[in-house]
């Protein structure tokens, strides 16, 4: 099944922009991408506002609206972008998202007669800071990588790694949205209760097994009314876009607290997302076949559709890097810890949406899902240190001679993502990074 019916002129790999930096090979933000963020000039007192990335620039959509060069649905969409965050625009739905994308694509294309006017709306990304792209009302974290679920399960329950519901239910828990911050927001090592397996009582203090989780963040656009469900066939229409997500995790706190109701303080101290939301439409060339092993239970009907089989997966490369304080002081570049791909996920984004709403639970514009840690089938594709260091038993060797079992103070974790294949423009996600600070 080809993706052709999902594609339009905005995906044409031959398109170039009059913003020259967008045409550089391996740019994260070519004209085929056009992701959204909330930004303002560094050091300024101005309000955050909504922008779209093009090459190494941001196009200020409030300024574009003020030019009054568009009309109809495009100008209506721009009007909703004249806010500090994206929720109002996200709530408009696919028709308006697509109308604005097409207009911006055309206006930014080489030779556009709008160049002279739009050039005044550009600001260098090097000169801006970001806020959360939208107000995240509710955040749900899934657990969609069977490779992660199995290897983590082995560490917590060696005799029973994968619980019997895993292959039937897209497992998730309700996370905490108040502590989600945008890339660059450093945070203090959390403190809490932990109990070593051999101890008779818990102790209190700074987390000793601090970890990252390599995840994808999924943003809901227009939601659903309480009591109504979103069918799997309509699910993707409700997804505005995707970002990179680091779900920091305190493994020692988690191990003691997680039964019987799931993770709590081991997750809610900090989570970090990349500033740019790459839209569902930009990702159309990378929607890929999804299959379920014949030996496994097939999805229940509400989680099953031909469209999901044909296009439910996303071929998105994910990478984690670390820069320790020692490396930073020596001006050494960050080094890769692992790479994986979101296409290895056991459940698709559409299945997450359909499952989340099947009981009538309402999703709202700006709600975010975490995909769960994306670990691939091979051990070196693990998306957390818990897996890479075999729960601390096998230290990870870094090129400068340092080792890590879990994160130390001063460690900066960087995650990157990109889609790339023959016949389509490369779509980059930028990055999410943050540094662990010492506990008080
Ligand atoms: Ca997680």
Image (cartoon, rainbow, N blue to C red):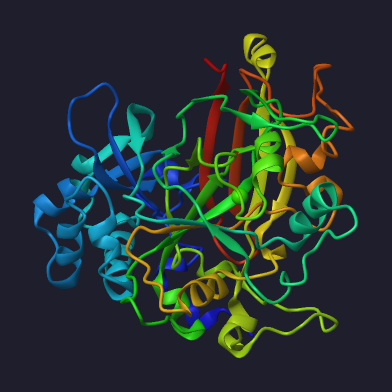
**Quadrant containing the N terminus in the rendered view:** bottom right
Q: Nearer the viewer, residue 123 or 78?
A: 78
Asked whether the viewer can see residue 236, the reply is: yes
In the image, is residue 361 above or below residue 403? below
Horizontal and vertical percent position of residue 124: 33, 33
In the image, is residue 210 above or below residue 138? above
Asked whether the viewer can see residue 117, the reply is: no
Q: Residue furthest top?
A: 329
Q: Nearer the viewer, residue 127 or 178?
A: 178
Rendered residue at 43%/80% (across/down):
230
Place residue 296 in its image quadrant: bottom right
Q: Nearer the viewer, residue 89 or 7?
A: 89
Rendered residue at 25%/61% (across/down):
89
Q: Residue furthest front?
A: 200
Rendered residue at 67%/51% (across/down):
259
Q: Nearer the viewer, residue 313 or 360?
A: 360
Horizontal and vertical percent position of residue 93: 30, 72
Place residue 101 in its image quadrant: bottom left
Horizontal and vertical percent position of residue 86: 28, 54
In the image, is residue 432 above or below residue 64? above
Horizontal and vertical percent position of residue 102: 32, 67
């Amino acid at each position: 099944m080809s993706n052709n019916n999902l594609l339009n002129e905005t995906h044409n790999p031959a398109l170039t922009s009059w913003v020259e930096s967008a045409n550089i090979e391996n740019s994260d933000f070519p004209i085929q991408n056009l992701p959204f963020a909330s930004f303002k000039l560094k050091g300024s007192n101005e309000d955050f506002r909504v922008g779209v990335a093009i090459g190494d620039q941001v196009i200020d959509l409030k300024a574009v609206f003020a030019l009054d060069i568009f009309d109809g649905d495009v100008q209506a969409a721009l009007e909703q972008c004249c806010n500090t965050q994206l929720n109002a625009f996200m709530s408009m739905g696919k028709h308006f998202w697509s109308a604005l994308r097409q207009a911006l694509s055309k206006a930014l294309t080489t030779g556009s007669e709008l160049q002279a006017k739009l050039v005044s709306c550009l600001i260098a990304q090097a000169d801006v800071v970001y806020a959360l792209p939208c107000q995240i009302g509710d955040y749900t974290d899934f657990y969609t990588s069977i490779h992660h679920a199995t290897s983590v399960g082995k560490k917590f329950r060696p005799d029973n790694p994968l619980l019997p519901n895993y292959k039937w239910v897209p497992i998730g828990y309700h996370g905490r949205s108040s502590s989600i911050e945008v890339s660059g927001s450093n945070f203090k090592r959390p403190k809490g209760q932990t109990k070593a397996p051999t101890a008779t009582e818990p102790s209190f203090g700074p987390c000793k097994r601090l970890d990252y989780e390599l995840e994808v963040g999924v943003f809901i656009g227009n939601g659903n009314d309480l009591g109504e469900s979103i069918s799997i066939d309509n699910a993707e229409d409700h997804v505005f876009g995707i970002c990179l997500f680091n779900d920091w995790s305190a493994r020692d706190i988690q191990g003691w607290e997680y039964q019987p109701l799931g993770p709590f303080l081991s997750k809610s101290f900090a989570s970090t997302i990349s500033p740019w939301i790459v839209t569902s439409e930009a990702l159309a060339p990378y929607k890929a076949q999804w299959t379920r092993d014949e030996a496994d239970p097939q999805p229940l009907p509400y989680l099953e559709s031909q469209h999901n089989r044909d296009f439910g997966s996303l071929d998105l490369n994910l990478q984690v890097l670390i820069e320790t304080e020692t490396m930073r002081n020596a001006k050494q570049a960050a080094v890769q810890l692992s790479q994986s791909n979101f296409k290895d996920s056991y459940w698709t984004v559409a299945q997450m949406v359909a499952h989340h709403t099947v009981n009538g639970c309402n999703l709202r514009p700006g709600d975010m899902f975490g995909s769960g840690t994306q670990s691939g089938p091979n051990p070196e594709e693990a998306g957390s240190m818990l897996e890479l260091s075999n729960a601390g038993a096998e230290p990870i060797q870094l090129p400068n001679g340092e080792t890590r079992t879990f994160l130390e103070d001063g460690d900066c974790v960087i995650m990157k993502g990109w889609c790339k294949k023959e016949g389509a423009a490369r779509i980059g996600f930028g990055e999410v990074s943050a540094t662990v600070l010492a506990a008080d």
